[in-house]
Amino acid sequence: QVQLVDAGGGLVQAGGSLRLSCTASGRTSSVYAVGWFRRAPGKEREFVAAINWNGGATDYADSVAGRFTISRDNINNMVYLQMNSLKPEDTAVYYCAARTSQFTIYRRRASDYNYWGQGTQVTVSS
């Protein structure tokens, strides 16, 4: 089992920045990739970014590429999502997720992820 705790959300003005964190515990040696997903009110959950736990390869949704950066700290079992140039449309609950399956990280399917954090609210005001 892997436990995830995500944090760092808050209220920020458009153009501002936030950094989300995801702390993993338990059988972290089994983790292959960690991703961030988000769900805005009235919308379906969508992929935001992912990182390969060991190799460091990354993938981003087109809507956040160039503004968000995902990174990892394997020593402390943490993954970060640095969010810059935030827009009101980035408002959502953000979820950290981890998976043990070794599909390519470019698959972007939420159903591939078997462990999830509790979510952290990000609100961007215009």
Image: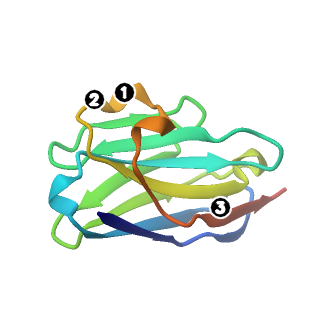
Looking at the picture, which amino acid does disc 1 mark? Tyr
Can you say whether 67 is above or below 22 in the image? above
Residue 58 pos. (x, y %): 32, 38
**Residue 55 visible in image:** yes
Which sits in the foreground, 85 or 113?
113
As drawn, the residue found furthest toward the front would be 1
Q: Earlier in the sequence, mark 3 or mark 1?
A: 3
Which residue corresponds to mark 1? 106
Front position in the image: 47 or 59: 47
State the scheme by which the image is colored: rainbow
For the residue labelled by badge 1, is the local secondary structure a helix, a strand or a loop? helix
SS class, disc 3: loop
Identify residue for label 2: 103
Q: Where is 28 relative to 32, above or below?
A: below
Task: Please tell me in which quadrant of the rendered image residue 93 appears.
Answer: bottom right
**Mark 3 closeness class: few <14, some 14–19, many ≥20 residues within 10 Å:** some
Q: Position of residue 96 (x, y in %)?
A: 47, 57
Mark 3 or mark 2, which is nearer to you?
2
Q: In which quarter of the image is the N terminus?
A: bottom left
Cα–Cα span, label 3 and label 1: 28 Å
Q: Kindly identify which residue carries mark 3.
A: 16
The location of residue 63, given as percent across then percent down, is 60, 33
Q: How crowded is mark 2: few (under 14 residues within 10 Å), some or many (20 or more)?
A: few
User: Up-down: is 43 above or below 14?
Assistant: above
In this rendering, does residue 66 appear at all? no
Q: Nearer the N terminus, badge 3 or badge 2?
A: 3
Distance CA(mark 1)–CA(mark 2):
8 Å
